[in-house]
Amino acid sequence: MGLKIETLSLKNWRNIEDKLIHFNKNLTVLLGSNASGKTNTLEAIQLLSSGATFSHTHTNHLLQKGKREGKIEATYTGDKRKITLACLLTEEGKSVKKQFFKNGKKKAQNHPQGTLPTILFTPDHLSLIKDSAHVRRDELNHFCSQVSPQYHEVLKTYNRALEQRNKLLKDPTLEKTMLSVWDEALSLGGATLFQARAQIIAHLMPYIEKAYHAFSPAEKLSILYKPALPNIGIFSEKTNKKEIRELFLAALQNSFPEDLRNGFTTFGPQKDDVVFMLNDKEARAFASQGQQRSLVLAWKLALVQYTEDFFQQIPLLLLDDVMSELDEERREAMTTFLRKDIQTVITTTHLGYFSEKTLEEADIISYP
Ligand SMILES: Nc1ncnc2c1ncn2[C@@H]1O[C@H](COP(=O)(O)OP(=O)(O)OP(=O)(O)O)[C@@H](O)[C@H]1O
Ligand SMILES: [Mg+2]
């Protein structure tokens, strides 16, 4: 079911001058000391597989310092197919150009629709619990865009329309009627986004409860989707799109005076939030470090399961430095999740975090 990554070649990619990795087994452990390039390797895998990178660094930083050209290339097999994806980095004056290739043919730059959905955990994701809502929206958008090209298209169109509407709102002499075409456009795309997010959160619920239970059986985790709409009493994942659209259109029209005062659009999916609840209390305010880590892991593992069940595609799981801060019990729970049928790449500075049995079944790639 689906593709697997078979090889990865890195040339002048960040701190890695030349490295070729074969993924022969389902579990690959990237082992090395700090700053040896393990996270950089995951970044390359994610960029090629999912078409987007998790680090928000400038393209210039992807090419090794002092080099004029670099390349990352991966091969994938499965479903009787073999695919090669590559990203070429070339210095151009003061900046670095990124070009993508699929089976040797050039692809549209920064194409977000990937070949193989990837679910990535990095310690940076701990911010999912405590940071502001935009981190959670980015996470949802990134995931939904990977599994649904339609979501990605709607999101792009919505954001363009929102930008236009916000630009107009900066003009204090603006009349309400001048916004009607943008209100229509926003309500149309917005209804799709609101509905998709509500449905995805509803579908994820049982998975995330189960995953968290494995980490911490005595605690109850739930997630709440909070659409940025007024009077959301009637809103649920079952509300039909036409109703959501009307609700959102009315909200846009009613908030015109406020929007004009603020100079931006008050309601809409660009202001949504997802709330993590632990034992019916907001995790944002109460969760300890260890609990935050387990919450984020449960979320990620739920995404894996959901992708598998709903899209018949086993994603690639990338786990960066996942073990170091888990206690023994949670580490055990994590190990049982490293299932044989989910291809997983995990980084570590220390093999002692893994059981002998796990290591027997893994490929270990050393970093100098
Ligand atoms: N463009 C670049 N050129 C050269 N070096 C770079 C470039 N970009 C990043 N680096 C360096 O790569 C090094 C390795 O980074 P990376 O995050 O992959 O290490 P790591 O093995 O994951 O370490 P840790 O165990 O501490 O997480 C960092 O020291 C960083 O400064
Ligand atoms: Mg790292």
Image (cartoon, rainbow, N blue to C red):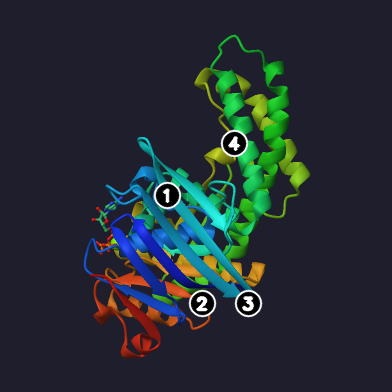
What amino acid is at disc 4?
Asn
Q: Label 4, on which residue? A: 159
* Label 3 or label 1, whichever comes before in sequence order: 3
Query: Residue 322 at x, y = what percent?
Result: 34, 69
Point out the frontmost of discs 4 and 1.
1
Q: Which residue is mark 3?
A: 1
What is the number of the mark on residue 89? Answer: 1
Residue 73: give x, y in percent of width and height.
Answer: 47, 62
Residue wearing tag 2 = 342
Mark 3: which secondary structure? loop
Numbered tag placed on residue 226 in the rendering: none
Q: Which tag, 2 or 4, sits closer to the chain's start?
A: 4
The residue type indicated by label 2 comes to Ile
Q: Quadrant of the C terminus?
A: bottom left
Q: Earlier in the sequence, mark 3 or mark 4?
A: 3
User: Which of the two marks, 3 or 4, is nearer to us in this view?
Assistant: 3
User: In the displayed structure, does residue 222 sit left or right of residue 246?
Assistant: left
Q: Can you say whether 208 is above or below 100 in the image?
A: below
